[in-house]
Amino acid sequence: MGKISVMCKDNDDIFKFPCDYPIKIFGLNQPELKQTICSIVESHVGQLHDNQITTKKSSKGKYVSITVRIIATSRKQLDTINHELQSSPLVSYLL
């Protein structure tokens, strides 16, 4: 399956850093998905807390969406996180 990524244009003017930034990730409902996502994000923002992570299963339970809210400090940080998440074979879609 190909990956789809929806990201904003390279225009830093739409962000005022630091800012609250949600990252929404979709993938097959596998136990290692959440841990993989958290590891990738934590390598760029530090330790995540449970209140920063929201998980929702699809109606049939085959897929899961995980939203991680971070305090983004730069466009480069967001681009790096997005690139690493897209590179993970466990991630199907990224918003």
Image (tube, rainbow, N blue to C red):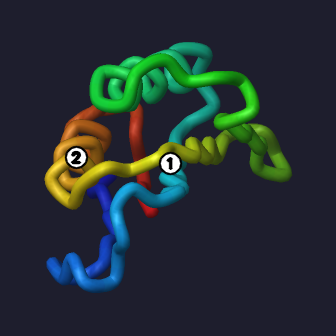
Q: Is residue 87 above or below residue 36?
A: below
Alpha-carbon neighbours of circle 1 within 10 Å: few (<14), some, or many (≥20)?
Answer: many
Alpha-carbon neighbours of circle 2 within 10 Å: few (<14), some, or many (≥20)?
Answer: some
Please state if 44 lies on the left or on the right of 65 as rendered.
left
Dividing the picture into quadrants, the one containing residue 17 is bottom left
Look at label 1 and name its amino acid.
Ile
**Which percent across, then down, holds residue 23?**
49, 52
Residue name at image x 18 percent, y 44 percent:
80
Viewer-closest of 46 and 2: 46
Dividing the picture into quadrants, the one containing residue 39 is top left
Look at label 2 and name its amino acid.
Gln
Q: Is residue 93 above or below residue 61?
A: below
Residue name at image x 82 percent, y 46 percent:
60
**Which percent across, then down, holds residue 48?**
55, 24
Please state if 42 lies on the left or on the right of 67 as rendered.
left
Residue name at image x 53 percent, y 48 percent:
26
Describe the element under mark 2 as helix, strand or loop: helix
Q: Which residue is mark 2?
A: 77
Please state if 32 lies on the left or on the right of 72 as rendered.
right
Viewer-closest of 43 and 54: 43
**Which percent across, then down, holds residue 51?**
75, 32
Question: Image quadrant for the C terminus?
Answer: bottom left
Describe the element under mark 1 as helix, strand or loop: strand
Dividing the picture into quadrants, the one containing residue 45 is top left
Q: Which residue is mark 1?
A: 25
Q: Earlier in the sequence, mark 2 or mark 1?
A: 1
Mark sitting on residue 14: none
Badges 2 and 1: C-beta atoms under 8 Å apart? no
Residue name at image x 28 percent, y 32 percent:
88
- State the CA–CA distance, disc 2 to disc 1: 17 Å
Count of number-bearing discs: 2
Query: Closer to the observer: label 2 or label 1?
Result: 2
